[in-house]
Amino acid sequence: MKLKILLTTFAFSGFLFAQDSINVIEEKIEEPKQGPKFKTSLGEIKLNLDESGDKNIKFGLSSQIWLRSIDNNPGTLVNGIPQTSTYDASLRRMRISISAQLSNYYSIVMQLGINNQSFISGGGAGTGANGQGKKPQIFFMDAYNELAIIPRKDEITKKENKHHLYIGAGLHGWAGVSRMTNASTTKLLTADLPVFNFPNIEVSDQFSRQFGVFVHGEYDKFNYRVAVNKPFATNRNPEVGQIVDNNQSGKLSYAAYGMYQFFDKENTATSFFAGTYLGSKKVFNIGAGFYSNNDATLSQPSEGVFKSHNEFIFGADAFLDMPIGRKAREMSISLYSVFYRYNFGPNYLRTTGLLNPGTADPNFTGTKALEGFGNARFLLGTGNIWYSQAGFVLPKFSDRVKLQPFFAYALKDLEALNEVGNYFDIGANLFILAQNAKVAYQYSSRPLYTQDTKEVFTRRGEHLITLQIAF
């Protein structure tokens, strides 16, 4: 009898277990398959040098490919032929970064690569194996050592310190003036930077870096950076009535930037600030900074009379990035506004044309732009610039991608010109893997000035598609 009861119990238990197993299997079969979700990061390439991972080497790769349609300035030749518009493809940025954390107190940072290679510029000259646009030179953009006086993380408890302080030296980008002067080129809101955020770009710096000593840190919610640098040498000689870059006296430069973080704190382990967080943080910061270099420019007000001038740049800005609306809709806004006051000396003016494909047409008889040929524009000069940008991540419509329209505006009131310049950018970012993989489109409109009145007489535009992979 007992044996029958025992066998019956086992059989009933087995039936119940089988029923549970069947139910589980059925639930798994009936559960719908989910597609890939939108990811906020590709992660990082990290080689740990100890079991804790505190000693490590990190690697980063970034690639930005440009496809453009350019409305050229009047009187432009491209490869010796007059062109009113030009199509091109180029490598805007191609970089490899390496950082080694050798202890909780000591690290090394390096970044190398190329910038601005197109079918006609960025490389050699002429025709042949080393011709126009071919085989650009790889160079270091960052190469510095850093020592922690007060590290971010306590060595014993492994908890974040409320305050931290670092000092470093080398070729670095710990710059002053503004947040955008310290911008990350792989986490942009717009398709590219306006460039005037780097006041000495490729003049007395190397792609916004200088050699020097820097200090950066954080005290509660106040984040700061200070640098003393040796600017790269400039030695141009001005004609009568002209002012040019000339720092032959060899004075040091001084720079600083500080910001107060009202909400979430940003990660400032590197010198670069993000242009948008896609709502992953709630950030509101206000900041201010400066750059100063005595005897940075030289003018010749009259024949044989030369005068040196100091350079002083001031910037004040505000940045907001936060999620809005219902959490399920995954919307966010990104807002940034900055005011710059530039002083390089009387009537200082500088032009630029990013990956400019053009040269001057000597036979052109129409109205020529004071800016020059190709896609040249007035970049900056003694005077004021106000710049603002805004972006909005649209309500969730896909599990795989996000779409972020943006708009940017720059007002340039420069001493050497007789009319204020208005510059516009409008476009959108399609994020596939957050900032790691994205496609951006941007249309930019720029004013052109006459050579005699120095007033706006027409406008030109530029269409840009950028393809980015970065991690």
Image (spheres, helix red, strand yellow):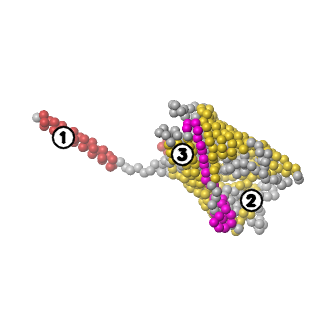
Q: Answer few, some or many: residues within 10 Å of disc 3's Cα (few below 14, many 20 plus, some between 14 and 19).
A: some
Residue that label 2 marks: 372
Position of 195 with respect to 392 (left or right) is right
Residue that label 1 marks: 11
Tell me where residue 223 appears, x and y as whole percent: 63, 36
Query: Is any atom of residue 403 visible in this view?
Result: no
Q: Answer few, some or many: residues within 10 Å of disc 2's Cα (few below 14, many 20 plus, some between 14 and 19).
A: many
Residue 111 in magenta?
Answer: yes
Residue that label 3 marks: 58
Tell me where residue 309 appears, x and y as whole percent: 80, 45
Q: Answer few, some or many: residues within 10 Å of disc 1's Cα (few below 14, many 20 plus, some between 14 and 19).
A: few
Cα distance in 3D space between marks 3 and 2: 43 Å
Query: Is any atom of residue 401 visible in this view?
Result: yes
Q: Amino acid at mark 3?
A: Lys
C-beta proximity under 8 Å, tags 1 and 2: no
Q: Specify which label sits upstream in the sequence, 1 or 2.
A: 1
Q: Amino acid at mark 1?
A: Ala
Q: Specify which label sits upstream in the sequence, 3 or 2.
A: 3
Tell me where residue 462 appears, x and y as whole percent: 65, 58
Quadrant hosting residue 123: bottom right
Q: Amino acid at mark 2?
A: Gly
Position of 33 with respect to 344 (left or right) is left
Residue at position x 50%, y 45% in the image:
47
C-beta proximity under 8 Å, tags 3 and 2: no
Residue at position x 83%, y 50% in the image:
299
**Quadrant of the rendering where the N terminus is positioned:** top left
Cα distance in 3D space between marks 1 and 2: 92 Å
- Which region is colored magenta? 103-132
Which residue is the extreme one toward the left? 1
Element under disc 1: helix
Question: Of tags 3 and 2, which is closer to the observer?
Answer: 3
Q: How many marks?
A: 3
